Image: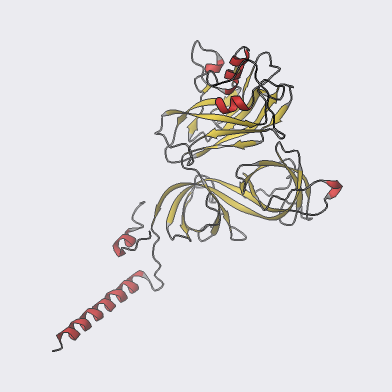
Amino acid sequence: MRGSKYTLVLVMSIVSLLGLTTAIIPTKAATPTVRIYVNQPPGGLPFQAPGTKFTFTINIATSGLGDGTTAGIIQWKMDMRVDPNVLDIDTTVSPGFPPKYAAKFKAGPGHFLYEFANIMGYGAPTLFLGTNDPSTGYQDEISETGVPAYDYGAGDYCSSTWPTLLTVEITSKNDTQGCLIDLIDVMYRTGDKVWHYADQVEDGYYGTLPTVVSEIADPFDPTDPIGSTWHELYPHYCNTMTLTSWEDNGDGVLSASDQIDMTNDTDGWIYWWHVDAVTTTIHFSYKTGPLPDGVPTGELGDAEPIEPRALEDPITEPIGTVWHMIYPDYCKEFVITSWQDNGNGVFDESDQFDFEFFGEGTIYWAHLDSVTTDLILSFKEKGPGVPEFPLGAAVEVGLIVAVAYIWWTRRRKLTEVP
């Protein structure tokens, strides 16, 4: 435990608790889908000692795409971002090796497109790395494609047999602070030379998987967060917590790189967290009934999506912004396509908007119920809650001792009576 803040708790002893032939048979479902995700354990990629090189894979899973058809995948591309204070992506190419064998990115044998090309008798696809900015952790335009482009692509069989799209080697710079491995603008091209957004993109996480909490206090003051109450959105929906201590990073507001204690109102324990990001969440409800211009609607239930945004930056131009859902379908992404303001010029409570999930092609109409501040937190440590002493610790300890003394002397007198 940090320091001696739990000494009183310990003294008082108050404790809570392969069969593919050359003639590939195409199969295609009614609604093809493509899922691209960071392959990681349920709790996130484990911490590594600073300076340690380690690898993870970005995988692909498809449904309804026929191998060896024009609907199959012939190329993919994406950007990737990490926190440069936590992880290092270095695209240095090993001497004497072609780009696809770059030191930190691999997409050779055993990978999705490579093995498909091998089966079809195509030349091996080429991995392109784009540019990397070490100061921001942003890797721009990673892509893999056949040169020249294939007419027929990979589908369900290849994604189930060789699900690895890309292997990434990375270097740890921190073993106490986690960070998001953010997959951005993930797209694939089919044999008909058409680009598509991936239907489902699942980012990764280095370190313990983060917790997302949403503030309950209204309005929330980021300069004085102690005592504020929060509602957990992910992974344990509906827990409530109270922020009980704050170590600021020096900017005077609750922001990324701060450290906080929060008391969980459910179990009474105090949890110590690193603040990864302070973001904005919109809580909305799907609307029913006829929609403007005959736009179809969807009955999917309440949702709570999230987009990183500064606390002091009200959303004044929501059209075209991309969001990812926290609850109930974590990480499902959508874009806002229209906006009906309530008259105050800010995207907030009582506005109405249209949005589209990437890859679905259906427009949904929603009512904006509320806008709240969110914290994305990395767990550091926990300890039993500190007991409350309404009259002061010294007074209450004295009362306990006095009661114990009276009980003991009275008991002795009673036992001495003949």
- Kindly give the residue lying farthest to the left in the view shown: 418
Q: On screen, 95 above or below 72?
A: above
Q: Residue at x 15, y 85 (%)?
A: 416
Which residue is rendered at x = 68% and y = 52% of the image?
Answer: 301
Q: Is residue 173 above or below residue 272?
A: above
Query: Residue 296's spot in the image, x, y percent?
Result: 80, 46
* Viewer-closest of 301 and 159: 159
Q: Which residue of the protein is positioned furthest toward the right in this rendering?
A: 293
Residue 413 is drawn in which quadrant? bottom left
> Toward which corner of the image does residue 32 lie, by quadrant?
top right
Q: How many marks?
A: 0
Q: Is residue 251 left or right of residue 409?
A: right
> Relative to residue 414, is residue 3 drawn left or right?
right
- Percent coordinates x, y for residue 281 in the rendering: 63, 50
Against 306, is 89 above or below? above
Which of 391/143 is in front?
A: 143
Q: Is residue 211 visible?
A: yes
| Picture coordinates of residue 109, whole percent (x, y) | 53, 18
Toward the viewer: 119 or 25?
A: 25
The image quadrant where one finds the C terminus is bottom left
Q: Is residue 38 left or right of residue 67?
A: left
Name the residue nearer the viewer: 218 or 329.
329
Residue 263 placed where, x, y %? 46, 58
